[in-house]
Image (cartoon, helix red, strand yellow):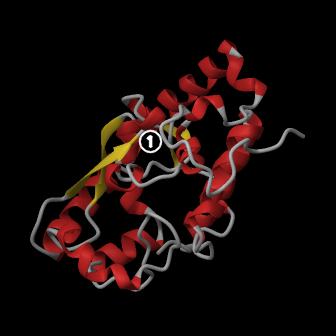
Amino acid sequence: MAQLSAVSPGSGADALDQSRWVVLSPHWRSPCRLAIKRALDIAVSAVLLLLLSPIFLVLAIAVKLSSPGPVFYRWKVAGRGGRPFTGYKFRSMVEHADALRDQLARHNEMTGPVFKMSRDPRITRVGAWLRKYSLDELPQLYNVLKDDMSLVGPRPPLVTEYVQFSAYQKQKLAVKPGVTCLWQVRGRNQISDFDEWVRLDLEYIGRWSLSLDFAILVRTLGAVLSGTGK
């Protein structure tokens, strides 16, 4: 098997294009496989958005009644190659939560430029339940339909986080980001080193195939039903 990355943690040359370094699965060069991946993204996201629309309405009401603020959280994230786009989630935190993040910086449980806190006081009661079953992520199906994201791919970081990435870390966005990924089905709540998260993303990029996407989606469904989200 090919090595997962030609750039190691701590490498310099942040300005270099990560596509020169990341090791891609040969399947990424197959127009047919890429067309099938995109067709599945469109079909699955469209069908789920239609079938889940009544649930969307119930969740929207629950979010609106739980705390002041909008129903949806619009997060500015980096997509393939660092291209910014607006992602959508059901709001699971208090209004203006982003402005409160700096006050919680010392409680960050993730080593690296991203923020993760298991007992984040900004999360509302309804938000905690949404996160437990990953229901807050459902609006990202719209981003999949728009072609900002894929069903499976590396998770997109906030633009404010991406600008702090090293060259090694930027490699995770050599492909389109996704709603779910290897990180979410392999230790999601146990990984505390961002470089380990990146390593899993690079493993996905290096091993990608349609069958791997299917396996990740099946395992994601199991993780969602078990309520392991935070």
Residue furthest right as drawn: 1
| Residue under label 1 | 48
Q: Amino acid at mark 1?
A: Leu
Residue visible at 32% across and 54% down? 160
Position of residue 53 relative to residue 104, above or below, is: above
Residue furthest left as drawn: 68
Residue furthest top as drawn: 31
Position of residue 225 relative to residue 88, above or below, is: below
Left or right of residue 214: residue 10: left
Image x and y of residue 183, in percent = 62, 59
Residue visible at 42% across and 52% down? 157
State the count of labels: 1
Image x and y of residue 52, in percent = 38, 48
Image x and y of residue 25, in percent = 75, 31
**Residue 153 visible somewhere in the drawing:** no
Residue 119: quadrant of the picture: bottom left
Image x and y of residue 76, in percent = 28, 48
Left or right of residue 16: residue 118: left
Residue visible at 73% across and 47% down? 203
Which element type, helix, strand or loop, lies under badge 1? helix
Residue 143: quadrant of the picture: top left
**Residue 204 visible somewhere in the drawing:** yes
Identify the image quadrant of the N terminus: top right
32 vs 174, nearest the viewer = 174
Q: Badge 1: how crowded within 10 Å, few (<14), some, or many (20+)? A: few
Left or right of residue 35: residue 211: right
